[in-house]
Image (cartoon, rainbow, N blue to C red):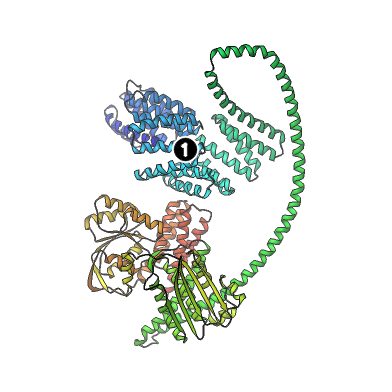
Amino acid sequence: MFTSLRVSLLTALLFSCSLFGSQSSFASTSLLEQFSQSEQWQEKQQLAKKLLNQSTTNQELSLDIYMQLGDFALDKGNFSAAVKNYQLAEQVTSFTATPNRYFRSLKMQGVTYYYQGLMQQAVLAYSKALSVAEKLPEPIAEANLLSNIGLAYFDMFNMDQALKYYKEAKEIYEEYGSEQDKADILHNIAGIYIRLSSYDIALDMYRETLEIFQKLGDEDGVAQSYGNMGVAYSELGQYQLSLHYYQRALRYYQETNNAYFLSSRHANIANVYLRTGDLELALSHAEKAVEFAKRIDNKTLELAGLLSQAKIELLQGKLTEAEATLTTSVFMAKQYKDDLRVQDGAGMMALIKSGKGDYAAAVASFDEFVRAFKSEQSLKLLKSMGELQSQIQASQLNQEIVELKQLQNVQELEMSKQRQLGIMLFILFVMIVVTGITIYRRNIEKGAKEQLSLMVAKRTKELEETADQLRSANEIKSQFLANISHEIRTPLTAILGQTDNLMNGYYKPEQLNDELAVIQKQSDHLKELINDVLDISKIEANKLELSLKEGDLVRLLTDVHSMLSGQAKDKGLNFSFHNELGEQFYSQLDFTRIKQILINLCANAIKFTNQGEVELKVYKVEQGVWFRVTDTGIGMNAEQLKQIFECFRQGDNSISRRFGGTGLGLSLSQQLAMMMGGYISVESELNKGSIFSFYLPCKEHTPSTEAVELAKFVQPITKGLSGKVLLAEDHPDNRRLISRYLESMGLEVIAVENGEQAVEHCLKEFPDVVLLDIQMPVLDGLNALKLLQECGFTQPVYALTANAISHEIDSYLEAGFTGYLAKPIDKKVFYTQLAKHCKKDSATTKSQHDMSDLVASFINSFEHESALIQQHFAAYELFNLQQDAHRIGGAAKMFELDDVAMSAMALESALKQDKLTDLTSLVAQLLEQLHNASVDQNSSISPS
């Protein structure tokens, strides 16, 4: 890890800037100020030259100028200029004159060489600086250098030297270092365990350092821990976990625009995709790794990226491109003495040459690979032999030398014979290999032709089967479209007819509520149809998530029975409810989805039963609950039972014509049940009725106080509240909508648009309750809460979020939020939570809220939002594009513009997960939805 490098560089920059103030008497103040404030390299060089040529410029000021030029060049990635200026700084000073600054000029040369990927030069510069650091009364500076030298040896794959320097640094940090220093060196040592294939030990150490970095707020350390954990999981073959941690690190480096680590992480991700066989993605990341390495002129990273790129091109069969890339890579490896990659390159070149049919070159490359491998093994063996030899007594050595001289002549003869035999055997081996390769290639060509014929026949059969499946699917879809067209037109006709009557005054005043009730009923039915289609689409796209909360299952069942009793009564049916759970049954479940399933099962039973009864029964078993819906309706035969849970299917087409329906309900219910760990089964006999059984795994537990309190508010809220609420929401239309809800409860509202304003008004107004949106500009909700806590603010603070997912909610509560309120607004939940902290007022709340002006205002902003999306997409500003999608999605969800909300959230999710392959289509889809909403808005207000 490079934390020590980062800290020392920042300290140096501050130190250098402070010294300029003390030297103003030696040169023109205005010229010094221009030099210090200039952000252009050419201009800064020219100003430096003028300052250095002035007669009043002394040695100390010259040192300041060279050091600042070096720091500026290093910050801009101009490494050659940085090294040159640090060397000039070294020349104008000495250890005797300015020991600390002389030490820094040496150390920064090593830092720059390291970032260039020139590890041997970095070690030389660091070692020179280390000899100076040992004379300084600053043990931490010495420890930092030891750690940096170990890091350079680590990147040269010299683990012995790396561990030696890490241990020396660790001893100093243990005595003098901070928690940050100790975490840094532990993080570096963990890297050695990865190189030694001890991945479990390395992961334990990275988890320990990750926890420390998170406590210290060291985001760079956290990102590097994520990256190295990705390396460990990759070597363990857990590629999904590896990609998860790599991408978390990559997002941080994209935000900080750190080209060094962007290159490293892209190279890591390329190697993972290479192992999983995703060659196109692997090549894309390898090319990015090379691009970022070239941007900062880092040869080590560029070499690693090129080697990965060559491997991918070889696997893709692009032998010419692979050979060109590999040749460049091996040339660089030899130039910078990277023996390990030279050896890898020789092995790969043998494979490429063999694939191209150049067997002589392939054998030559293979020999080079073997020589490199043997050379490496020989060096290790010689080192071991040297240690052994030092332990042998001198007398024994002399005796062996005498004996060896006596046998020397005999051995030379034997060796000569062996060499001749070896040459003959090698020639024979080469001839056998060449002959074998020729025969093998002919057999392969013959087998390939036969295999191709089989593959063509198999593929033809598969295409025929696929065509049959497509024809069947087309018939099913056509039937579904016919069904859904009828189902949608029926309530739509009623809505339009009733609306037309109301607009033309064809009603009596006392009938107004009845007319509106018809419109409400048909609108709810239309909404249910659309929601079924959208839920099926979400499940198929794997984007539907469960929202678990605590509640009473008995109350839910009572609601379902009450809701559908009227339908049964209208048909003359007896709809009974048998409860064996007791008076209450509290559990942690997705009650919305359970209610959706039960309504579907019971409504179907009532729909398909003309006389008799429908029974809803519930009882407990050891691991959960069984719901059973029994009817005396039309029933089904065996063939219909096979298709009953398929999408767009009903028992037969006549059922749709007689009873209506889309064929989605049971399929959706089964998929929802399976998402919750349960299932639905059916028993039926034609003309005798059906029994649908729904098993739901769950555990009963004692209800919390909050759940009991929430259950009390089953009647419309009539009592108002009094108090002051601060609302922080960045979207203006959302802010107005929520403010209007709060004001309707009788509350005084302070509305602000970002976290910074929220903190300011909280400390000035001290509201009774604070509502903070999580994602806001300037200062987000989490950081605003942290700042309020530091300032001693103790009033309740709630998180406002459209992402009410369990693990995110847990993180909000851990951060210190009193609770959370989900968007879109549930007025009952809002009232319940606010009533805990605000006084109840005798005044009543306003029951109706006209939000049409807010909806219109939000839609009118779509033209501006579309322009921002197009601007950020054209500039490939992915972070800003993600912010646009989050802002639009949250507001659209609040105003129940489902199509816009789904498109925006799909784009935001893809950007968060770094899934950019469908980025263009997702952006186009969102722009189309925004345009359609604007067109609908304009057409609805245009004169007829």
In the rendered image, the vertical position of residue 599 relative to residue 814, given as above or below: below
| Depth order, front residue of 272/174 | 174
Q: Quadrant of residue 470?
A: bottom right
Q: Is residue 653 left or right of residue 553?
A: right
Farthest bottom residue in view: 508
Task: Identify the image quadrant of residue 411.
Answer: top right
Q: Quadrant of the N terminus?
A: top left
Residue 424 at x, y = what percent?
75, 26
Quadrant housing residue 862: bottom left
Q: Which residue is mark 1?
A: 191
As drawn, the residue found furthest toward the front would be 622
Residue shown at the point (53%, 22%) measured from the top left: 387
The picture places residue 878, in percent across and down from the top left corner, at: 45, 52
| Disc 1, SS | helix
Q: Nearer the viewer, residue 582 or 715?
A: 582
Location of residue 816 with respect to 843 vertically, above or below: above
Q: Position of residue 176 (x, y in %)?
A: 33, 32
**Residue 603: percent from the left, percent from the top?**
48, 78
Which residue type does callout 1 highlight? Answer: Gly
Which residue occupies 47% across, 37% down?
191
Q: Residue at x 52, y 76 (%)?
A: 691
One can see residue 383 in this view: yes
| Quarter of the picture holding the C terminus | bottom left
